[in-house]
Image (spheres, rainbow, N blue to C red):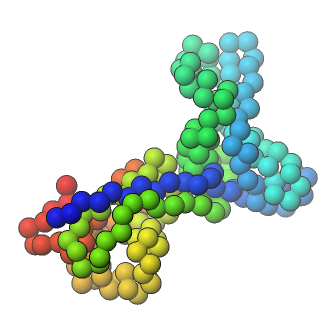
Amino acid sequence: MRKIKWFVTCLKVPTITRHCKKCNVDTEFSCSERFRINAQGKYLDVWLIYNCKKCKTSWNSTILSRIHTNKLDADLLALFQENDLTLSKKYGTDKATLKKNGVVIQSIEYQVLGDLFELDEEVAVTIQTEYPLDIKLFTILKEKLSLSNNELHHLIAKGKIVGSSNRLFKEKLQNQHTVLFNPKKESKIA
């Protein structure tokens, strides 16, 4: 069985929806991919800065609040200070952090990197990401393989595409999943 890896990468931090005080309506905010750090004595606050798409008003998404300087790793602090793009993507796609801030993720721009194959080949595809993206595995497969919903449903129903469970295709991508294409009866997902 041929093994292929696909890597799903976030092209930029997703937009969010929240109430804009200046516009006085719920509106879309884009991430500046920059952090704001505030020090109060031995305590730090860290925010990820967003801007209203209509009026450009800024809003800060809380990342760390009142954390003692001894508790924050020096390397992590340096990444915040350097406005590290990978770190901004990590926090900008983190549903738990965004939920605590009372916002809703809107659109995610992503790309699936990895080799394509013939749909009749016996292949194990490992799909992974470093960000917990709000995208269903079904959608990733459909877009990467250029299939319609019906075509993909048909392949899954016929056992041509198999996951670790039937629900796998409805789940959102978290870290890593393996999907088998045209598996033999003895083939198992590792």
102 to the left or right of 55 = left
135 to the left or right of 160 = right
Q: Residue furthest left?
A: 186
Residue appearing at x 56%, y 26% in the figure: 76
Q: Position of residue 50 (x, y in %)?
A: 75, 46
Q: Quadrant of the C terminus?
A: bottom left
Q: Is residue 48 visible?
A: yes
190 to the left or right of 68 = left
Q: Position of residue 32 (x, y in %)?
A: 73, 45
As rendered, which of 120 and 155 lies closer to the eye? 120
With respect to residue 178, does 76 lie above or below? Answer: above
Residue appearing at x 86%, y 59% in the figure: 54
Q: Is residue 97 visible?
A: no
Q: Quadrant of the N terminus?
A: bottom left
With respect to residue 87, does 17 lie above or below? Answer: below
Residue appearing at x 29%, y 78% in the figure: 119
**Count of numbered circles in the view:** 0
Q: Position of residue 85 (x, y in %)?
A: 61, 40
Q: Position of residue 91 (x, y in %)?
A: 59, 42
135 to the left or right of 177 = right
Residue appearing at x 63%, y 63% in the figure: 107
